[in-house]
Amino acid sequence: MQSIAGSPTIPSIAPPPEPVPAPAARRLPGVDAVRGIALLGVFVMHFHLTGWLRAGGLGEVPVPIEWLQTQTSSRAMSLFVLLAGVSVALMTGGSRLYSGRAGTLARRRIAARAAALFVIGLGIGSFAPSVLEYYAVLLVFLLAFTTLRARTLGLLAALAVPAVTLYAVWVLDRHAEWLMTETPNGLELLINPDRWGDYLFSLVFTGGGFQTVYGIPLVLAGLALGRLDLRARTVRGGLVVGGTSLALAALLVSWLAPMLFPDWALTEHTASNPLQLLRMPGLYAVSAVGIVFMIGVAALLLGVLSALLDRPAARWLLRPLTALGSMTLTWYAGHLAFLSLVGPQTRFSVAAFAGFIAIVMVVSVLWLRAFRRGPLEWLVHRISAAAAQDRVARGDRDGAPPARSPRDAVRAAPVATPVADSSRGRQPLGRTTLTALTAVGIGFAGVALILGVGGWVERGQLPAREPAESRITTMSDTESAVREADPALSGSNAGVPGADSGMNTTALTRPGVESVLSADDREFLAALARGGEFAARSEGQLLDAGRAVCAEVSGGADMAEAAERLGERTGLSAAGLVRLTVAAWDALCGRP
């Protein structure tokens, strides 16, 4: 063959460009299903469930409900944090690690996503406690590990488990005053630059009950799991076997620990007791066994649900769960806004809670029929895509770069989009709008129905508080302060859950569900800060002091002894700390 100029044409020997996998094909429904389970666990943590068909009183919580809330406490958020590592792995190539420019773009998107989540977290923090700020810090932390393989990441996660728990023990035992650092809340941070240093220290090292530090082994383990080929049957089988073995081993160690180390079991139940590292659930920040258990549970769920959702029937049945898991950010912020609107002391029945879950799932399915992402997911995606200047990934909800190497980027390989998904998110405007309005209408109507049905929801009222001057007085006997603060607490060893102390510990062991202070709580703490033995102490310092005490009590510590130890380090009255903690237990000791 001759060219136009008459010279022979050199045939191309380059192979044809390989099509880039379609964005829809990269979505792993098993990961979405696990996210949905984690979000349901967060709902259980934050809704104050006190009855089956009718919301009961604070002291009338059925045992199964109380057990469920206790077992869910901290574990749902642990699962969320681990899945953050899985998401980072998928964004950087999964089992086929991105390199060159593709890897740079992926890391840039992760950094932009972290920044967006941080700002959203500050916005939520203006009306409710949020963990998104800690989540954002962990995403930035993972940027340094995105080039590592699964085996290396697994080893680092194993080393991090004892390191982070021993760090929490060290802080609680030697530097409890770090937990009392007063920091601005929510968007208030932006107008207080002089407090940024304190805020960053708390955010990274102690805040939220060591949320950031505690999450390090979890995100590393999640990154390791995401580096595996989660579509391979052998990998899924290995996750099921390995995850089950890890979770059962953690349960066995937790059960045997008191019998293997009886001397530790007989000593004081403080964070510095070595037995706390092997206790479960206990105080999550110092429970090494608890972290291992959650890694095993996450691996098990990923293996089982990924295999199950390969079947069309299972995908149809679990569509509400996977849709919920695709909109976790939207619903996390939405449920906190809802609880803030109805009031932090509001109590719900299981029937009302089930109705809320059903509404959320229906709205999720309808919304995703009209749009590719939830509202907040869309916002974060747009920010991260703009930061990476990634145009091809418009349909990729997991945010993967469009090419796997610089050569692929130059070739601008065509996208192979399956016919079944070609119309996804491209419905006519009228139908899309109608579907979205239907979803929103069902949501509002359902919430109104739940709040309107008699007995399903009970607006809780805080008991009237006595003036701070009459409630808080200096006492030499801290244990008598415990008994005076709550007449139900009678006995010489107050505050040891499960101990043979001859006292009713319901008020101390009842799981807290709302860490947001109501207006009455804030007024009470402000009164304490203005007078009596807590004079010259800010409301935030009192809040952190009470939480420091109940953190140890939740792990099995004696309340009087915990207050005495904290009082010695901070200069606060131990008796006053006891009264403060008992008086506002639900508000101060609420779970994140």
Image (spheres, rainbow, N blue to C red):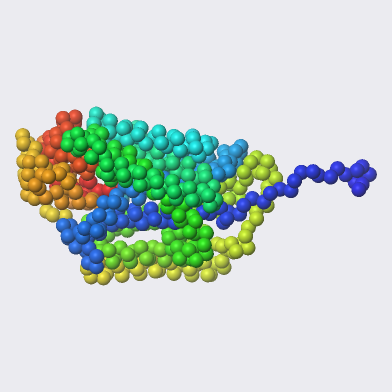
Residue 69 seen: yes
Residue 250 position within the rendered picture, expressed as x and y whole percent measured from the top left: 34, 43
Q: Which residue: 49% across, 37% down?
A: 151
Q: Which residue: 55% across, 44% down?
A: 95
Q: Which residue: 35% across, 63% down?
A: 357
Q: Is residue 577 above or below residue 31?
A: above
- The foreground one among 543 and 97 is 97
Q: Is residue 334 above or below residue 86?
A: below
Q: Is residue 162 above or below residue 19?
A: above
Q: Which residue: 62% across, 52% down?
A: 21
Q: Please give left or right for residue 403 compared with residue 555 in the image.
A: right
Q: Please give left or right for residue 310 compared with residue 357 in the image.
A: right
- Give the quarter of the image for residue 263: top left
Residue 519 position within the rendered picture, expressed as x and y whole percent measured from the top left: 21, 51
- The foreground one among 125 and 355 is 355
Residue 399 position within the rendered picture, expressed as x and y whole percent measured from the top left: 53, 49
Q: Please give left or right for residue 438 compared with residue 389 in the image.
A: left
Residue 464 position within the rendered picture, expressed as x and y whole percent measured from the top left: 11, 53
Residue 517 seen: no
Query: Which residue is situated farthest in the right direction here?
Result: 6
